[in-house]
Image: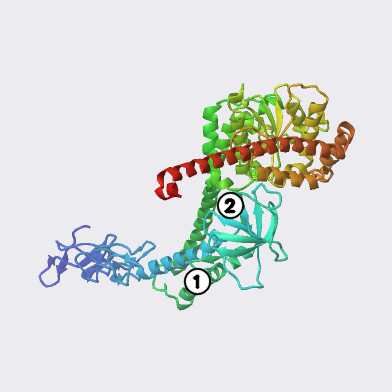
Amino acid sequence: GTEERLRDGASNLCSVCDAGKYSDPARGQAACTACPAGRAAAEHEGAGECSHCPVGRFALMGSSRCDVCGPGLVPDADQVSCRACEAGTYAGNAGSECLLCHTGFHAHRASSACTIDVTYIALVLLCVVVQHLGLVPLRRNLRRRICIRDVSQLGDKVVVSTLHSHDIMRLESGRRIRAVVRDTQHQLLDEKTFLVVVLDPKRLELRSLDGKSMHNQVDSSMGFLTLVSPHDILYTSTFGFSSFLVAATFLPMPWAVWAVAHVLDIFQDRADPAWIEFSLVLMVVATAITSIVTAIIERWRRAKSLSPMQQRIRDFRRKLRWQNPNPQPCERGPHRAVSVAVLTDLLNTFSDFIQDRTAYYLDSNIIRPVTRTHRLSFAEVAGPRLVTHFVSHFWGTPFRHFVATLTRHSKSAAGQPGSQQLGYWICFVSISQWEVTEELGGGDWRESSFYKALHHETCEATCMVLDDKALPLTRAWCLFEVLQTYLLLHTHKRPDFKGLFFCTKEGVIGSQEEGCATYDVSVALANRLLSLDVAHASASNEKDQEMIARVVHEEGGGMAQMNTFIRSNMSDTLGVVHQRFEKQMVSLRRNLSDTFNAGDEDTCVEDPRMVEL
């Protein structure tokens, strides 16, 4: 400002205003006046006005300079004094304004810095953890797929073994848990609802909805079951407690914490209490969303993970791909036979799964999954060969017994011309399970793969795989195969056709092979055939059964003729068994007699007392 002087009335001299004061004679203010608060006059030769304090500074009335506020303080709006920063805000030294603390930090009144908001962090962690714990039962068990490792018949129970712990609770009698079974590839199980009874942490018993044990023979090594809602929450356990109890206890707790914080106004001294409370809600919601996303990812990964059977099938496919890199479809019928080596490899690869199971199990659990990619028959995928023997069998025969029987037959044929190229035509590996209607001839039995294979010029005989119950002869399609064998023999279309062989795991009945089928097995089968009537043979498809009965009547002279043929064939083989048995008995008696006589001679020579006698 302009330098101003005050004239002294006595001496008629001018003097300078003191620091912190000013005068303005031009405006009629001749006397020195103290600067108002918020302004200051520097200490020099006088000033015509006081300067405003810069931002962040203040001045009292009559101040010669503007000062800064201390830590935690800022100038007030008029810059006349310092005021303390409110709780939740802070100001450093010489601060011009109070700054808000970031979420998760807090400052008391007149603070120069923010510190961690322990109360807020503790409540957030509590809400997040509790919310997570409350969501675990829902995430794990709501509509959860319980992967099946194995389904089998154990005594009078159908037992499901699960891949992981099923977490289903044991309940007192009277309370029932329902579950739906899917993707086992078994028609008695898939998409059906059962009662489940806990046997142990990885085993369940399936029962019908009326609570009765199931006596059906069911076998599977794939699929999953899902508890029916709300049973998936009510009757499962989490952390050793009821899932429902865990969810009901923990899920409301974050909201209870929020309500308590709101009612008690715990965050009243924060800069923005409403935002603090809202952030708690956001954290809870974010935790829920995160849990949902995690559950989706976990279920996706679980769905993509392979069960032990699926892993084995994957490895077996790779092995087959190495052996037969480019499987090609071949003509239906005679060109889809397999060797005993292929059957043995199949059994050995899946032996721990197959155990004493049958072709019914193999078809849905192994054959179809292995051939699904190419949608061909197993023979085409594994490497086919031309038929030499048509195999008539019952699908309910244990596969181990089946392979042992054909292995024994192949050994009996060893040394014969072409024995290294034996090809067995077996329906469940030689026909495409993806085109069953076409394989059965589409209504014309002469176009069926069975007929084509059996009537092919390279087919030498029919091998009927039997046990002591002769179960193949109770099946209509086996009867059809017997009929075609009968026609081939009696129409003389194939003079080189050898007819019907009765094969067991002990050997071919009537074979001259050493150590083949025993006399007891032959007698047991003959007794069974005396009481067996093929007129009672059945089929899974009623139309197939009617068609086969009609063909037997029209082509083979009726069921009585088929019974006669089978029994006559068995009678002829029994004759061979009888002769062989008598020959063995004579040989054994002769050897025993020779041994006894030789023993007597040795005794007479070596014992002096016997010589004296």
Residue drawn at x 54%, y 37% as measured from the top left: 316
Please state if 197 lies on the left or on the right of 608 as rendered: right
Picture coordinates of residue 251 (x, y %)? 53, 68
Which element carries disc 1, helix, strand or loop?
helix
Vertical arrangement, residue 525 with respect to residue 141, above or below: above
Above or below, comparing residue 109 to residue 555 in the picture: below
- In the rendered view, tell whether residue 586 sits above or below residue 166: above
Along the horizontal axis of the image, is 409 left or right of 46?
Answer: right
Q: How is the image coloured?
A: rainbow
Give the farthest residue toward the front. Answer: 612
Query: Residue 559 at x, y = what percent?
Result: 86, 39
Q: Would you name the residue on which mark 1 appears?
A: 253
Q: Amino acid at mark 1?
A: Met
Residue 275 visible in the picture = no
Extreme residue toward the bottom, this view: 264
Residue under circle 2? 150
- What residue type is disc 2 on? Asp
